[in-house]
């Protein structure tokens, strides 16, 4: 990039936005890694990206041409400063007008972390205004980034559901244990009573809104939970109970869906044992078939771990 004098130029507070994306970290990271992907999402609503260059290596180019609905064009040109695969990206970007005049500099950091529901992406962007007349553009960045992450969510879902994509099944199993400061009966109630389970078996507050919840806790009974994430994607948990021994064991199978896409089929067993006075250990074993690249045993294990920690917090 061309060297630009920055002495006494106005700086603006950084923008921080985050979003839960319903895919493994590897796939969300991949959406930043090629021009084909970036052209579909790296711009606010209504804008298109007719040209892009993405050379994902330290010092490699990241260049995007954004075209507004009225036809006005701006270039974003910069380089990758730091790359930690599936964890962190740092880019040094400059936005130019249609006459190639620099408007503002944007130091951009993206962090990728496992989260309930998939991957939590956090974007931080700091600004150095190079042309005072362009300050309004940086001021509108929070809304612009919110719209851009909506488009990223759609691109990730497209990557998952593309009919051209290969069909696959990954089989995996895992076991998790938690010991709670609560008697066996209270832990069993948190698993078997609809109101008690609603306190912990749900998406994160502010990131997920419940649409439907019902629970018929008996052998042959069904449980169903649907909710809409901040991205607009609807997730569905659809289960049937096969074996119940009060205060000891629960066995059920379940399907997980994202919108109209089935992403996994699993068999789960929950075993409860006393671990001393007023303490109980919960052991969860799951065997899963993860479909068409969405998920794998590691991602589901981490998600289940988040939920078991929420269960523990609900018991206090």
Image: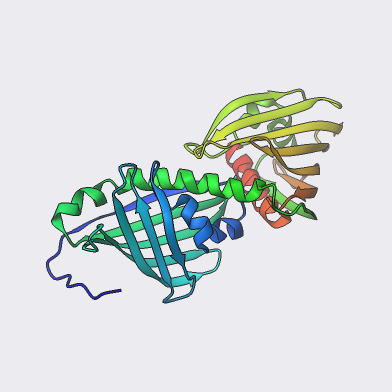
Residue 211, horizontal then vertical, whole percent: 59, 26
Residue 75 in the image, given as x and y percentages of width and height: 32, 59
Residue 81, picture quadrant: bottom left
Question: Can I make out residue 84 in this image?
Answer: yes
Nearer the observer, 180 or 260: 260
Please identify the residue farthest to the left as the structure is shown. 8
Q: Is residue 183 visible?
A: no
At horizontal 30% and vertical 74% (from top left) the residue drawn is 1
Q: Residue at x 82, y 36 (%)?
A: 252
> Which residue is depicted at the point 70% across and 57% down?
298
Q: Position of residue 288 (x, y in %)?
A: 79, 48
- In this rendering, is residue 135 above or below 203? below
Of 225 and 164, nearer the camera is: 164
The correct choice, above or below, for 229 with respect to 35 in the image is above
Q: Quadrant of residue 245?
A: top right
Measured as percent of width and height from the top left, residue 18 is found at: 44, 49
Which residue does the image show at 56% across and 33% down from the upper left? 228
Residue sitting at the far front: 71
Q: Viewed as shown, does residue 146 lie left or right of 252? A: left
Indicate the quadrant containing the C terminus: top left, top right, bottom left or bottom right. Answer: top right
């Amino acid at each position: 990039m061309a060297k630009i004098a920055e002495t006494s130029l106005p700086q603006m507070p950084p923008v921080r936005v985050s979003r839960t994306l319903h895919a493994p970290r590897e796939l969300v990271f991949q959406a930043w890694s090629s021009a084909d992907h970036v052209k579909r999402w790296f711009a606010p609503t209504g804008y298109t990206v007719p040209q892009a260059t993405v050379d994902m290596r330290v010092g490699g180019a990241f260049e995007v041409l954004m075209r507004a609905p009225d036809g006005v064009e701006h270039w974003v040109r910069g380089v990758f400063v730091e790359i930690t695969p599936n964890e962190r990206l740092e880019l040094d970007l400059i936005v130019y007008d249609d006459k190639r005049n620099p408007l503002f500099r944007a130091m951009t950091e993206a962090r990728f972390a496992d989260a309930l529901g998939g991957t939590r992406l956090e974007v931080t962007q700091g600004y150095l205004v190079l042309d005072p007349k362009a300050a309004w553009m940086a001021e509108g960045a929070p809304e612009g980034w919110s719209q851009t992450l909506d488009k990223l969510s759609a691109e990730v879902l497209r990557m998952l559901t593309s009919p051209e994509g290969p069909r696959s099944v990954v089989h995996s199993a895992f076991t998790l244990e938690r010991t709670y400061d609560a008697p066996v009966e209270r832990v069993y109630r948190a698993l078997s009573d609809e109101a008690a389970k609603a306190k912990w078996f749900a998406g994160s507050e502010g990131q997920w809104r419940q649409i439907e919840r019902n629970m018929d806790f008996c052998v042959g009974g069904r449980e169903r939970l649907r909710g809409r994430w901040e991205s607009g994607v609807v997730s569905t948990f659809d289960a049937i109970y096969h074996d119940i021994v009060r205060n000891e064991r629960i066995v059920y199978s379940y399907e997980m869906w994202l919108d109209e896409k089935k992403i996994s089929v699993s068999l789960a067993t929950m075993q409860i044992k006393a671990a001393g006075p007023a303490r109980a250990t919960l052991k969860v074993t799951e065997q899963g078939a993860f479909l068409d690249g969405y998920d794998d045993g590691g991602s589901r294990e981490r998600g289940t771990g988040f939920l078991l920690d929420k269960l523990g917090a609900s018991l206090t």
